[in-house]
Amino acid sequence: MQIIKDRKIQEDGWLLLPEGATVPDEADVIVSVARWNRERDALLRRAGKTGVVVRSDESPLDIVEPSSLPLIAIDFPKFSDGRGYSTARLLRERIEYRGELRAVGNVLRDQLFYMLRCGIDSFALQSGKDVQGALEAFDEFTVTYQAAADERRPIYRRAPRGA
């Protein structure tokens, strides 16, 4: 499967495991927050890397040792559910998570620019969506007014001052 990461199309090396599935030793896997918190020591001893998926009804504040995770995926269950945006901002700004934040689930082209502004840096679009065409979403807006995870200063702080 292809994803967008750092505004480039890449092959995805991560496997999103359903709850209760056997964890392969060599593969890079994404597990639930509950499984990570329960089996963290065993998951860290594996040869493969481990990431966590935060569902829309879960808080990122419940993740034990998030800084030890190379990837945190944020689930967007449907287009109209905006809780993932808040989750991303919490992870970047309050928890100060610096690893990869990935949008998964119902991820659509129209949302990519806004997800990027919240601190998400990789995107797994829904199956069948045009990944190449989705790259254009990042260039549709050239000026932002508000401060966000990608630019902490609002426009009036970025504008040059007259003498």
Image (cartoon, rainbow, N blue to C red):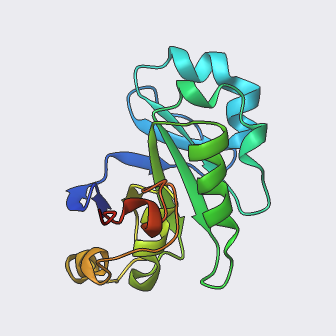
What residue lies at 60% left-to-right and 45% top-to-bottom? Answer: 93
Q: In the rendered view, would you say 13 is above or below 56?
A: above
Residue 125 quadrant:
bottom left
Quarter of the N terminus within the rendering = bottom left
Camera-side residue of 16 and 160: 160
Q: Residue at x 48, y 67 (%)?
A: 115
Whether 18 is drawn above or below 158: the answer is above
Q: Residue 60 appears in which quarter of the rendering?
A: top right
Q: Quadrant of the C terminus?
A: bottom left
Describe residue 120's horizontal placement relative to residue 18 as left or right. Answer: left
Instruction: Write the residue at 47% across / 36% down.
Output: 98
Circle count: 0
- Residues 91 and 144: in front is 144
Can you say whether 113 is above or below 84 in the image? Answer: below
Is residue 1 at all visible to an observer of this figure?
Answer: no
Query: Whole-percent x and y of residue 159?
Result: 35, 66
Question: Residue furthest toward the front?
Answer: 163
Q: Nearer the viewer, residue 133 or 20?
A: 133
